Image (cartoon, rainbow, N blue to C red):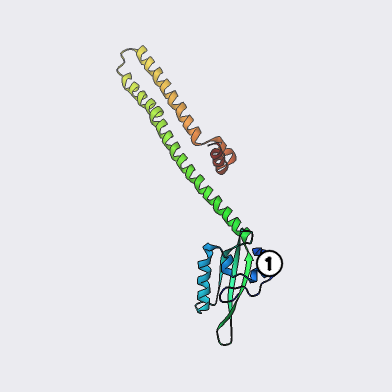
Amino acid sequence: VSPEGRFLRINKKFCDIVGYSEDEMLALTFQDITHADDLDTNLEYVRQVLEGEIENYSMDKRYYRKDGSIVWTNLTVSLVTATDGNPKYFVSVTKDITERKQAEQKILEYQQRLKALASQLTIAEETERRRIAADLHDHVGHSLALARMQLDGLQDSPTELERNIIVKDISNIMLQALQETRSLIFELSSPLMNEIGLCAAIAEWMEEQ
């Protein structure tokens, strides 16, 4: 490639990558087929090499193919100079890395989905905590408070019949509190988790939600 960016000599592999014939390529510059988002970076590297700030450079960049599609490449460039030190031409090695970039994009998308799922799980966990706290307060807490009130009134009951009735009420209240507590414990420690493990249990729960 000339210092100005014109293609001087190319091989068939590069033509295959960008989709142009050799004759078509020799009428173009690298600026003509470089993706707009990568052009400024590429030109800055060229300037640094021409001014002797760096000896060579390597970058991932995109080319516009002849059919309008985009191909990702890894580009490595060195400068060949004349005996007087003036630049003669660039030697460039280009490798098609489109598949790698697509794989990286898929990984990025998966990571974003995982972050979204983790966020949903955190929200769901907080909602569940609040529900459990409300159940403890509204049901178990009230039942125990009522049982204590009944116990306080037990000593004031004048007859054995009344005391027996109060004891029976207390027994029913405690039974209800016990059932509600067991229900909460069951929800907090699902048998499914013990059978298939935490990760699988969470995955199944997320799928159901």
Figure label count: 1
Image point 31% across, 20% down: which residue? 153
Residue at 46% x, 43% y is 122
Identify whether 137 is placed above or below 44.
above
**Of 120 and 57, the residue lying toward us:** 57
- Residue furthest right in the image: 12
Report which quarter residue 199 is drawn in. Answer: top right
Would you name the residue on which mark 1 appears? 21
Q: Amino acid at mark 1?
A: Ser
Please provide percent x and percent y for residue 157.
31, 15
Q: Residues within 10 Å of mark 1 (few under 14, many from 20)?
A: some
Which of the image's four quarters has the N terminus?
Answer: bottom right
Choose top left, top right, bottom left or bottom right for residue 6. Answer: bottom right
Mark 1 residue element: loop
Q: Nearer the viewer, residue 208 or 95?
A: 95
Quarter of image, res 30: bottom right
The residue closer to the viewer here, 112 or 149, is 112
Residue furthest bottom as drawn? 84
- Provide residue 100's location: percent of width, then percent of height: 61, 59
Query: In the rendered view, would you say 208 is above or below 172?
Result: below
Q: Position of residue 103 (x, y in %)?
A: 60, 56
On screen, 103 above or below 90?
Answer: above
Q: Residue at x 48, y 42 (%)?
A: 120
Q: Position of residue 22 (x, y in %)?
A: 68, 69
